[in-house]
Image: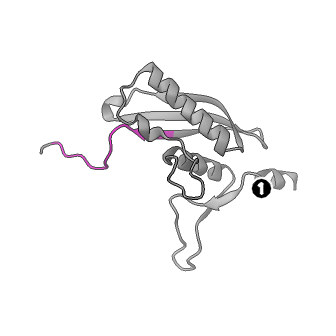
């Protein structure tokens, strides 16, 4: 019973992106650790001002999109992530943020967040690919 109460703290919410059951029309839900990971994905992918009822919610990573990749920029990105999680994800404590820049030629920075879930004291990590170039389709020969 105690384990169930600890896990209830982690919450339950809509899956992201939202999905619906084909026959019943019910909203697809996620819970516990998966809800925390989807919450982190939403937080890092939202820019402040996008949510009408929560204009301060978000991480504002998109302002770094076309900046040159320097040690200063990496430090700023880590601080933005740390601060956003501190304010908007009270279920976890961030242990470490690592930014992998080995794929920058492909236009990708991989952000890895190691965290501990406060109530259960379990550790986990979250990997977020941040794309340096906009658009989903590129043509080689124009």
What x and y, as percent, mark residue 129? 45, 40
Q: Residue at x 54, y 29 (%)?
A: 78
What x and y, as percent, mark residue 16? 53, 58
What x and y, as percent, mark residue 105? 31, 30
Q: Nearer the viewer, residue 104 or 78?
A: 78
Above or below, 43 against 124 in this view is below
Q: Nearer the viewer, residue 86 or 95?
A: 86
- Quarter of the image with the N terminus is bottom right
Q: Residue at x 62, y 51 (%)?
A: 34
Colouring convention used in this rendered image of the protein: one colour
Give SS at disc 1: helix
Is 116 colored magenta in this rendering? no
Q: Residue at x 42, y 27 (%)?
A: 101
- Quarter of the image with the C terminus is top left
Magenta region: which residues?
Answer: 128-140
Q: Main secondary structure of the magenta part?
A: loop
Location of residue 29 by image quarter: bottom right
Provide the residue designation for mark 1.
8
């Amino acid at each position: 019973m105690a384990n169930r109460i600890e896990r209830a703290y982690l919450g339950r919410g809509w899956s992201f992106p939202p999905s619906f059951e084909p026959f019943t029309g019910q909203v697809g839900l996620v819970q516990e650790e998966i809800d925390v990971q989807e919450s982190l994905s939403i937080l890092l992918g939202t820019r402040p001002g996008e949510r009408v009822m929560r204009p301060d919610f978000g991480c504002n990573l998109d302002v770094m999109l076309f900046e040159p990749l320097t040690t200063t920029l990496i430090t700023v990105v880590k601080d933005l992530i740390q601060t956003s999680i501190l304010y908007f994800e009270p279920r976890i404590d961030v242990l470490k943020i690592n930014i992998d820049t080995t794929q920058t030629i492909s236009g990708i920075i991989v952000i890895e967040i190691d965290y501990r879930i406060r109530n259960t004291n379990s550790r986990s990590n979250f990997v977020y690919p941040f794309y340096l170039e906009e658009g989903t389709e590129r043509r080689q020969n124009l």
